[in-house]
Image: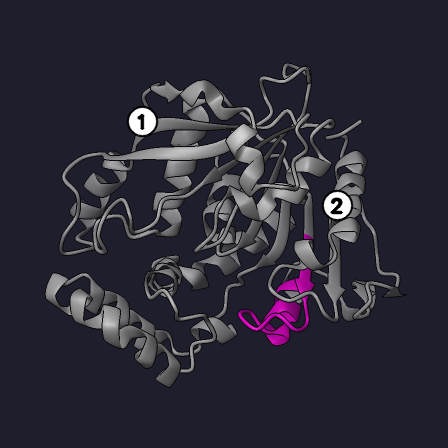
Amino acid sequence: MAFYHTLNIQIRLLSPFVKFHRCFSRKSSFQEHEICIKTCGNLYRKWRDEKKFRNLPSEDLNFKITYIDNGNSALNTISAPVIVAIHGAPGSYRDFIALSSYFEQKARVIVPTFPDFSVYKPGIFRFSDEEKAQLTKDFLAAISVSQVDALIIHSSGIYPGLHLCLDNNLVKSLIMLNPGTYSYDMKSIKNIKFLRRLVAACEIPILMKTLEYLGPILLKLGKVPVRTDNFLDPLLSATTMVHSNIPEAKAKFLHLSQKNFPMLYAFSKDDKLIGSKCCYELAHLLGVSNAEIYAYDENGIMINEGKNSSVLKVMSFEKGSHYVFWKHSDIIHEAIENFLRRNMIIV
């Protein structure tokens, strides 16, 4: 469901790129690309038959996806493992700049930026787990990637990520960095009923205009722990979580665990969007006890050496925030590399 219109955009080899992304050196092999894809038409037809939503697009939606990829570098892309990273909402490929640089000479690293409300108004593309998974598959097909050796996800990226991991051997391993879980007890969505009403209201144009002014106040009253200076950002996050079928993630996590799917899971005890309770519940669901979790103090010093099997490693950080791979990048990068080596993904 994608068409090749690879706007190579004379693929700005990092002159304007470097101005904004100082983590990349001028010798970096990463280039910024754009590609146009059509996606989700079949999914909308299925949803129409199921009467899932009152209003649905009648055909494929068109997106221009911006992404970084070092696949055209001197790296042997035929034999190099493929790493794909999926950001949360809001987010962009910039979230993974440091991680991409670390693996630049070890793998082909591809990081797309998902669309936001600048493309379609609320109520058209709902940023659901199924839509984003389909968009990702169509994006990968458009750039001729048929298998992903390691899928790295952050935050709400876990929900489309789970779909991809369960899709016909598309993905070989999963690396979860501060992922969402399967529980509505997560701190960011404890008021899920309020968020559902807010998201539904924003699909009505006249209410959307009103809520752009009132939304930040309502979010504060609803005690939603997100920044509200740009209402469209928390609205994007809320829309994503409302439509991500969160409770269904539990069965998906269990299925991956029971089939010994290689997984690395890193979380922060001070994550204000997820909460430590939900993080530990997910770790236990995956089959790990507290004693088997690699634990790090606020300075990134290991205080408990956990269980390190070939297929599952869980890491907790006392102070890692919602972006543990920024705060403790050296530890996370090394852990990912070792995990990939153990699973024969990087040799």
- Residue denoted by label 2: 333
Mark 1, secondary structure of its residue: loop
Residue 302 visible in the snapshot: yes
Q: Amino acid at mark 2?
A: His
Give x and y (percent) for residue 281: 62, 70
Q: Are marks 1 and 2 in contact (CB under 8 Å)?
A: no
**Residue 206 or residue 107, whichever sits in front:** 206
**Residue at the image point whose x is 36% and y is 77% from the top:** 219
Vertical relation: 334 (above or below) 279? above
Give x and y (percent) for residue 261: 65, 43
Vertical relation: 45 (above or below) 125? above
The quadrant holding residue 147 is: top right
Q: Left or right: where does residue 19 sit relative to residue 2?
A: right
**Residue at the image point whose x is 68% and y is 18% from the top:** 75
Based on the picture, tell me whether residue 7 belongs to the magenta stretch: no
Mark 2, secondary structure of its residue: helix
Residue range highlighted in magenta: 265-283
Q: Left or right: where does residue 130 sit relative to residue 272?
A: left
Q: Left or right: where does residue 89 sit relative to residue 105?
A: left
Q: CA distance from mark 1 to mark 2?
A: 34 Å
Vertical relation: 119 (above or below) 273? above
Give x and y (percent) for residue 333: 75, 45
- Residue denoted by label 1: 1
Q: Amino acid at mark 1?
A: Met
Q: Give the mark, 1 or 2, whose residue is nearer the N terminus.
A: 1
**Residue at the image point whose x is 82% and y is 63% from the top:** 300
**Residue at the image point whose x is 75% and y is 71% from the top:** 318
Residue 261 visible in the snapshot: no
Give x and y (percent) for residue 123: 21, 55
Q: Any mark on residue 108, and which?
A: none
Placement of the C terminus among the 4 image quadrants: top right
